């Protein structure tokens, strides 16, 4: 149980376009999801905390108008990278906490974004 | 949030026991200690979690001293497939709260045949 499904796993887009990444909790409800980005050989960096039914909380230095987060239901959070540029190329990962499953996080498989 | 310090990398031969220590000197009373494993181009995977003393599951053991200022992940008899980055996280995901969880540098474990 506690599966977090993230799609797409890989996306290549042209500079200036927008890309949407979906994160779904398949067998549980997630009131809170976290979005991370990871550059090669580096650790995960928290971008924002996605709260169901309310605005996301962004970390310092993360542009909320560029990285749009929507958490409209208890099983789906989306991250949209707007007007993508090559410097946005990175590995994006979502995670969720499961109620009643202790203080642990379950992660999606990640999305590799490449902006040409 | 408690800051964690881990070795950047470790090497081990197949079949050996590997111990990775994490320092978290300013751990708070409500904080749990959780270890995750990450393979390249994949999301992290939960390994083990503890609050105090010793915890053991089918893949690892976690040793936490009484002062909780450090913890040691023990992987018995590692194989090549255990080559990965291991992250130690300290924090509390409070019910009804949105306390964030941030990752440290992690330890890259390289298992050698």
Image: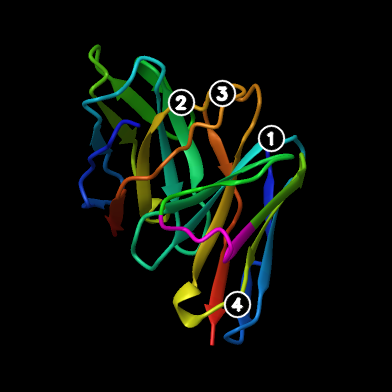
Q: CA distance from mark 2 to mark 4?
A: 35 Å
Q: Are marks 1 and 2 in contact (CB under 8 Å)?
A: no
Q: CA distance from mark 4 to mark 3?
A: 38 Å
Among the 4 quarters of the image, the one containing residue A64: bottom right
Give the image location of residue B26, x and y in percent.
24, 25
N-terminal of the two: label 4 or label 1? 1
Q: CA distance from mark 1 to mark 3?
A: 15 Å
**Nearer to us: label 2 or label 4:** 4
- Residue extending furthest front? A65
Give the image location of residue A96, x and y in percent.
61, 40
The residue beneath circle 3 is A102
**Nearer to us: label 1 or label 3:** 1
- Point out which mark residue A31 bears: 1
Q: Chain of mark 1?
A: A
**Nearer to us: label 3 or label 2:** 2
The magenta span reads: A61-68
Give the image location of residue A73, x and y in percent.
79, 43
Q: Which secondary structure lies at badge 3?
A: loop
The residue beneath circle 2 is B92
Quarter placement of the C terminus of chain A: bottom right
Residue A114 left/right relative to A79: left
Q: Chain of mark 2?
A: B
Marks 3 & 2 on one chain: no
N-terminal of the two: label 1 or label 3? 1
The residue beneath circle 4 is A83
């Amino acid at each position: 149980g506690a599966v977090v499904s993230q799609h797409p796993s890989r996306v290549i887009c042209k500079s200036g376009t927008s890309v949407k990444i979906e994160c779904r909790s398949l067998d549980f409800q997630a009131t809170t999801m976290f979005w991370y980005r990871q550059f090669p050989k580096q650790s995960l960096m928290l971008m924002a905390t996605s709260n169901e039914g309310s605005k996301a909380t962004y970390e310092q230095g993360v542009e909320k108008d560029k990285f749009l987060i929507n958490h409209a239901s208890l099983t789906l959070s989306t991250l949209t990278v707007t007007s993508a540029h090559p410097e946005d190329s990175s590995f994006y990962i979502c995670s969720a906490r499961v109620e009643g499953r202790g203080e642990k996080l379950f992660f999606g498989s990640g999305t590799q974004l490449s902006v040409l | 949030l408690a800051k964690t310090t881990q070795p950047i990398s470790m090497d081990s031969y197949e079949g050996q026991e590997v111990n990775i220590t994490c320092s978290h000197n300013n751990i708070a009373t409500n904080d749990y200690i959780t270890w995750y494993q990450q393979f390249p181009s994949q999301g992290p995977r939960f390994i083990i979690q503890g609050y105090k003393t010793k915890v053991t599951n089918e893949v690892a053991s976690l040793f936490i001293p009484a002062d909780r200022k450090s913890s040691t992940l023990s992987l018995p008899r590692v194989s090549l497939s255990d080559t990965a980055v291991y992250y130690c996280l300290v924090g509390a995901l409070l019910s009804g709260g949105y306390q964030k969880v941030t990752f440290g540098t992690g330890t890259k474990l390289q298992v050698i045949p």
